[in-house]
């Protein structure tokens, strides 16, 4: 576990190379980082809003990011500098604008109240993922599994425990966005909190309507930028598993650490936690049945025994209540945050995969550009050879015209006529080398003949014309690839620095949340022990009032009569001799 912490690449250390220089240590990128869009993004290194998990816990700090230009009332409320909290106050069943009933969650943000169903939370998160491909977007609770629908059938969406869990985790999702130094400025999020705005209208209006189909062919700092260079279309679309020629070491370390983190959470920690909660739940159910049995048994007895049995049953009931309370607190303050961080690990993997694809995109563009330059060099070399050959032929032709002597009269007339014929022939275009499609052919061969004629026309290309056309197209492609390489270098540098900055912020958040989770678990167990101790101490007092068994006097006390004058020992000082009752003594 110590090695696991030592290999953490997210921690800030004076000995570590800064994220901007580390991200390009293996890639020669001289272009400056793309400037963030002033309308939507802040600096990735702006002050973070440090609040521990859970959102309703203590030790919360007020916001430190102050703004002067607000886009709306929700933006002003979020950045008012006060200790604010977005609440989901209720979950109601409705069928508004739908043929089937569904659950809507009531959100209160200041004096505004909005109502959204689960699918709208899902669309909000997917929209933020597309708008900010280099930012860690908080997760939302998972969907119902097929097993849940199979076991509960039509009641799966109305499960009270599931709805309560979604309320808590969706509230955490909204508050994490509200405390993020960049996401809290997004106007789409502000409109989500505003109950007077139709969410369907938001989804079909800018900036969401301007999102590209492929984020890899859009600027990393602002995918909705309509003024971006058309050279983005020339960028390749690599796979996330494509190997890198020169990987960045810090990104590799981040991927290794994230995989370890995900394996720890989704592996033993979540499994053991689920098993522990299951056993606590079974234990609580057993205590409930035992308490009822003891209380019923006390009704059949009388005197001190009945009172003691009743008090014991009450202590067992108190243990059941405290165990149920402990189970709820462990689920809310430990199990759910643990599952959330398992989701965070998957999100970070996708974020690092995006950065990996951007790096592969840069290398692939670089390779394509080098290949096109080599191709252009071959074309130009062929062009120089053709010109040199043409010059040599023209010189030989001129020399051949000067050397021969004048021919005889008959031959002169014949050569003149031949020359006129050649001149007339030079103006004549030779027929197409392919078969004439209009020549009478067998029936049913017209389409085949037309295709053959077209193919012969495509193949009959002048080598000089093809070479010059290839040179022109290659130069145009090289110019476009140079622009694309410059844009790819900018995106790679911006993605590396922004992702690393948000990973550093996430690491600080993770440490604070895990600390709060551990304290909450310790506090829950302490309170559980206190309540049980009080209940069982009260039961002990009643049990001590039960008189001793009449046959519990030892034979040594019967032999020595002098000791009979001493006061009889209390019930707590003698152990009950169960064998005396069995043997009839």
Image: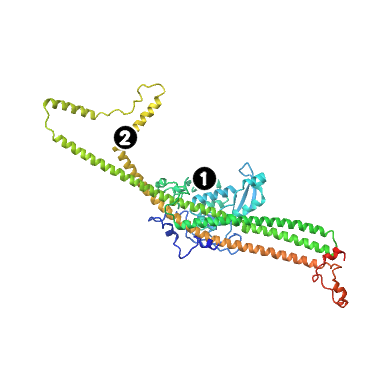
Q: Which comes before the other along the chain, label 2 or label 1? A: 1
Q: How many discs appear?
A: 2
Quadrant of image for the N terminus: bottom right
Q: Quick one: 78 or 130, which is closer to the camera? A: 130
Q: Could you say where residue 360 lies in the image, as x and y percent from the top left?
A: 43, 50
Nearest to viewer (mark 2 / mark 1): 2
464 up-or-down from 108: above or below: above
Spatial distance from mark 2 to mark 1, Cα to Cα? 50 Å
- Dot 2, how many residues are within 10 Å of its Cα: few (below 14), some (14-19), or many (20+)? few
- Name the colouring of the figure: rainbow
Q: Which mark is residue 23?
A: none
Q: Is residue 476 left or right of residue 574?
A: left
**Residue occupying the far bottom of the picture:** 562
Q: Could you say where residue 388 lies in the image, as x and y percent from the top left?
A: 23, 42
> Is any atom of residue 138 visible in this view?
no
Q: Which residue is mark 2?
A: 461
- Dot 1, how many residues are within 10 Å of its Cα: few (below 14), some (14-19), or many (20+)? few
Q: Are marks 2 and 1 in contact (CB under 8 Å)?
A: no
Q: Could you say where residue 210 lies in the image, as x and y percent from the top left?
A: 47, 46
Q: Could you say where residue 29 lies in the image, as x and y percent from the top left?
A: 39, 55
Which residue is rendered at x = 63% and y = 42% of the image?
Answer: 100
Q: Quick one: 393 or 67, which is closer to the camera? A: 393
Q: Which mark is residue 204?
A: 1
> Is any atom of residue 93 visible in this view?
yes
Quadrant of image for the C terminus: bottom right
3 up-or-down from 458: above or below: below
């Amino acid at each position: 576990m110590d090695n696991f912490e030592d290999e953490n690449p997210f921690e800030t250390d004076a000995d570590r190379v800064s994220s901007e220089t580390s991200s390009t240590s293996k890639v020669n990128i001289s272009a400056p980082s793309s400037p963030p869009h002033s309308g939507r993004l802040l600096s990735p290194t702006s002050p973070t809003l440090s609040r521990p998990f859970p959102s309703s816990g203590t030790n919360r700090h007020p916001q430190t990011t102050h703004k002067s230009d607000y886009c709306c009332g929700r933006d002003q409320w979020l950045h008012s500098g006060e200790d604010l909290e977005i609440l989901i106050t209720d979950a109601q069943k409705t069928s508004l604008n739908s043929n089937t009933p569904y659950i809507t969650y009531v959100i209160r943000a200041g004096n505004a109240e909005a109502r959204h169903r689960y699918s709208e939370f899902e669309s909000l998160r997917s929209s933020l993922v597309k708008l900010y491909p280099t930012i860690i977007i908080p997760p939302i609770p998972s969907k119902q599994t097929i097993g849940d629908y199979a076991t509960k059938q039509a009641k799966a969406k109305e499960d009270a425990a599931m709805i309560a869990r979604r309320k808590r985790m969706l509230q955490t999702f909204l508050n994490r966005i509200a405390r993020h130094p960049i996401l809290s400025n997004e106007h789409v999020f502000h409109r989500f909190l505003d109950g007077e705005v139709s969410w369907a209208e938001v989804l079909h209006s800018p900036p969401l309507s301007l999102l590209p189909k492929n984020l890899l062919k859009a600027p990393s700092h602002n995918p909705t930028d309509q003024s971006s260079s058309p050279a983005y279309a020339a960028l390749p679309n690599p796979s996330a598993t494509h190997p890198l020629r020169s990987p960045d070491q810090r990104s590799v370390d981040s991927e290794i650490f994230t995989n370890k983190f995900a394996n720890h959470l989704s592996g033993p920690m979540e499994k053991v936690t689920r098993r522990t909660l299951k056993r606590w739940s079974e234990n609580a159910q057993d205590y409930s049945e035992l308490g009822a049995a003891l209380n019923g048994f006390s009704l059949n007895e009388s005197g001190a025994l009945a009172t003691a049995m009743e008090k014991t049953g009450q202590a067992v009931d108190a243990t059941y209540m405290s165990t149920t309370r402990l189970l709820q607190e462990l689920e809310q303050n430990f199990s759910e945050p643990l599952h959330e961080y398992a989701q965070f690990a998957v999100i970070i993997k996708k974020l690092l995969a995006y950065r990996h694809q951007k790096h592969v995109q840069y290398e692939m563009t670089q390779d394509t550009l080098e290949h096109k330059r080599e191709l252009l060099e071959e074309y130009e070399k062929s062009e120089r050879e053709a010109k040199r050959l043409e010059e040599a032929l023209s010189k030989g032709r001129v020399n051949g015209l000067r050397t021969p002597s004048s021919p005889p009269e008959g031959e002169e007339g014949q050569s003149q006529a031949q020359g006129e014929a050649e001149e007339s022939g030079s103006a004549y275009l030779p027929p197409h080398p392919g078969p004439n499609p209009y020549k009478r052919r067998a029936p049913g061969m017209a389409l085949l003949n037309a295709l053959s004629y077209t193919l012969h026309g495509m193949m009959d290309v002048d080598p000089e014309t093809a070479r010059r056309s290839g040179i022109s197209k290659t130069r145009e492609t090289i110019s476009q690839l140079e622009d694309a390489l410059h844009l790819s270098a900018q995106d790679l540098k911006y993605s590396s620095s922004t992702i690393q900055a948000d990973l550093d912020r996430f690491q600080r958040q993770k440490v604070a949340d895990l600390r709060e989770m551990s304290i909450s678990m310790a506090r829950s167990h302490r309170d559980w022990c206190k309540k049980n101790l009080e209940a069982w101490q009260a039961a002990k007092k009643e049990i001590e009032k039960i008189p001793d068994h009449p046959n519990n006097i030892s034979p040594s006390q019967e032999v020595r009569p002098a000791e009979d004058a001493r006061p009889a020992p209390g019930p707590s000082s003698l152990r009950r001799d169960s064998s005396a009752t069995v043997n009839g003594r």
